Image: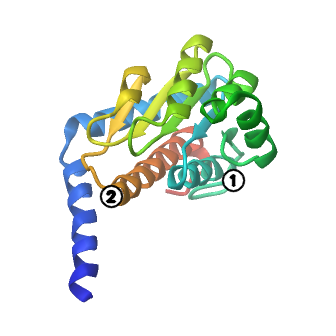
Amino acid sequence: MERLILDQIRNSCEVKNIICNDRELITLIKETCDVIISAYKKGNRTLIAGNGGSAADAQHIAAEFVSRFYFDRPGLSSIALTTDSSILTAIGNDYGYERVFARQIEAHGIRGDVFIAISTSGNSRNIIEALKTCKKKGIITIGFTNKTGGNMSRYCDFCIRIPATETPRIQEAHILIGHIICYIVEKYLFRNESNN
């Protein structure tokens, strides 16, 4: 059992080491931070969605923006499109599950907002429909996905491809990058309120 535990830890570390040494990916993460910072400066918001574990990641990242990350500062508008059971079931019932995020983007999203789309497969139909809706509305799109990017990569302005194929490793890296983005955005928007 100990060997199995260590194998999981080593596998996770290996993915993070690959990310750490991928200059293109680091540059892409920086660019997504810049885009989100710019959107917040203009009074826009982030919208975030995913399914299953990625839904939990969407809620987690939105919570860091709205509440706080490292220090007290004004809240940043961020909506996880995964949280309202009445909205999700109404849209699912009336329009189909593939529209659960797109319909909310139609309702909440405005030009200049940023949509963070999370899918370990890159092929989630409801994520792809949401990305298509964003294109129509002038909403900037950032994808978090796997090594290949899947079908969603064609619809993202920025697509962060994790160099892994196993769902747990992809999800661990997604939340790492989500945390990095929250850290950078908070630090650059509220420099004067940070003690670091």
Type of amino acid under label 1: Ser
Mark seen at residue 48: none
Give the answer, above or below, for where 178 lies relative to 81.
Answer: below
Badges 2 and 1: C-beta atoms under 8 Å apart? no
Task: From the viewer's side, name the closer residue of 96 and 11.
Answer: 96
Give the answer, above or below, for where 160 lies relative to 107.
Answer: below
Mark 1, residue position:
67
Name which quarter of the figure residue 113 lies in: top right
Q: Position of residue 160 (x, y in %)?
A: 35, 37
Query: What is the secondary structure assignment of the residue under circle 2?
Result: helix
Name which quarter of the figure residue 168 lies in: bottom left
Gap between marks 2 and 1 measured at Cα: 27 Å
Q: Position of residue 92 (x, y in %)?
A: 71, 36
Task: From the viewer's side, name the closer residue of 116 and 31.
Answer: 116
Direction from residue 85 to residue 31 in the image, left or right: left
Q: Position of residue 89 (x, y in %)?
A: 76, 42
Residue at left 49%, top 50%? 183
Direction from residue 72 to residue 21 in the image, left or right: left
Residue at left 81%, top 44%? 86
Type of amino acid under label 2: Arg
Residue at left 55%, top 25%? 129
Q: How is the image coloured?
A: rainbow
Mark 2, residue position:
169
